Amino acid sequence: MKLADNKATLSFSNGTPSIDLPVYHGSVGPDVVDIRKLYAQTGMFTYDPGFLSTAATQSAITYIDGDKGELLYRGYPIEQLATSCDFMETCHLLLYGNLPNAVQKKDFSSLVTNHTMVHEQMQFFLRGFRRDAHPMAIMTGLVGALSAFYHDSTDINNAEHREISAIRLIAKMPTLVAMAYKYTIGQPYMYPKNSLSYSGNFLHMMFANPCEEYKVNPVLERALDRIFILHADHEQNASTSTVRLCGSSGTNPFAAIAAGVACLWGPAHGGANEAALNMLGDIQKNGGVEKIGDFIKQVKDKNSGVKLMGFGHRVYKNYDPRAKLMQETCKEVLQEMGLEKDPLFKLAMALEKIALEDDYFVSRKLYPNVDFYSGIVQRAIGIPVPLFTAIFALARTVGWIAQLNEMIGDPEYKIGRPRQLFTGAVPRDVKPLAQR
């Protein structure tokens, strides 16, 4: 960032002297007012619930322009990455700042492939969970437990430790997600296969069994790879901010990523695609396509409490650029699986049509978002709804690591310590028990 030519002047109506605050330019996007010395100069803090107007860090990884519907990874538009690159190339880009050449891609992919197995004792760790446990409950435990198995890569201030923990996390997340799935359905775990791609290997671990040969469907493999690319990073969202805040204390990378997994679990964040599919299921139970008009009326009624899940986005005030890409993939997968006439998918397409044409939704820019389409794609592939958020965590791991590494390398980084506007009781004395 560089200092702007102008300064921001903060003036007060009560006669307190005004102060000048530095303004900084980023490479793109809004300028920022530097308020770091505000408390020292005025004795006041800023008040910004949800940090909606606060830049808590400087970052060179991901940029979003919500008004334009633009998403860039290291300057590259998501549309180009999703159509011209695979997930391993995207991981290399996010971690190291550049797209790999052919040799770098081969070396990086081999490095990840050679770390996909997990310690055999992780299987016994799984047995402590009930078979009907939510996959995200399992994932929170498993990712945090990695630090107990890999003591040689837990120093967050050691660059070599951060490097090997990054590779381990990216490599082992698909294995852990597949193990969590196999455990909940009572099937034997499938070990990784080094001959398969990252996405192909995940499909194999999820859906193969020891009784017969499993052939990876290239259409599903590409679809899953695109899901991973589109969810790899998304600026300073709730889970990324959680990883940064957790990591700012100096905790090990596995613990910081486990904190991100826990945050992602929420239905307002990573659980949105699960919530969207559950919404479709509820509409289907209550009459399906024939009753979709009644559902839309409820959505428009503010007093009904009914929400349209999978539409609109906190940041994008235009169409979510990832949704357009996921929509293409959605149609490819439904055609490949012969599911165009499946009742739930017909319902989803009918809902999409209404949202894109109805003035109520168009005027409010409630377009289908990436969660809507990725949920449909995952269900078509055969991934159960409760596992959707775990897939999201798998994809976002590389973004979390890139953000964590960037923070550790930032000379201005400090342990996170938000301030507050206190509205509780003023100082008071404790009375003896008999007088209370």
Image (spheres, rainbow, N blue to C red):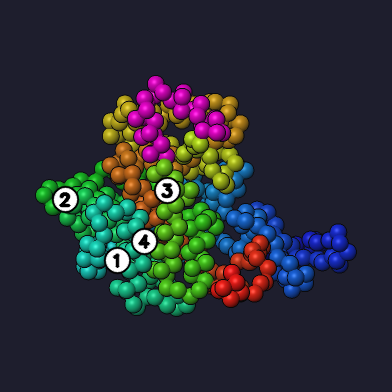
Check if residue 277 falls in the magenta segment. yes
Task: State the residue at coordinates (37%, 28%).
Answer: 286
Which disc is residue 140 wearing? 4
Whether residue 196 can be seen here: no
Task: State the residue at coordinates (46%, 28%).
Answer: 295
Q: CA distance from mark 3 to mark 4?
A: 14 Å
Residue 203 located left or right of residue 90: left
- Secondary structure beneath disc 4? helix
Q: Where are the magenta residues, as a range?
A: 276-304
* Residue 219 coordinates in the image, percent (x, y): 31, 41
Residue on which disc 3 sits: 271
Disc nearest the viewer among 1 and 2: 2
| Vertical position of residue 36 compared to residue 331: above or below | below
Which disc is residue 209 wearing? 2
Look at label 2 and name its amino acid.
Asn
Disc nearest the viewer among 3 and 2: 3
| Vertical position of residue 384 compared to residue 251: above or below | above
Nearest the camera: 307 or 277? 307
Nearest the camera: 149 or 291? 291
Residue 31 located left or right of residue 403: right
Q: CA distance from mark 4 to mark 2?
A: 25 Å
Nearest the camera: 375 or 301? 301
Mark 3 burial class by Cα count in 10 Å: few <14, some 14-19, many 20+: many
Look at label 4 and name its amino acid.
Thr
- Residue 126's image quarter? bottom left
- Secondary structure beneath disc 2? loop
Which disc is residue 115 wearing? 1
Mark 4 burial class by Cα count in 10 Å: few <14, some 14-19, many 20+: many
The residue at the far front in this view is: 434
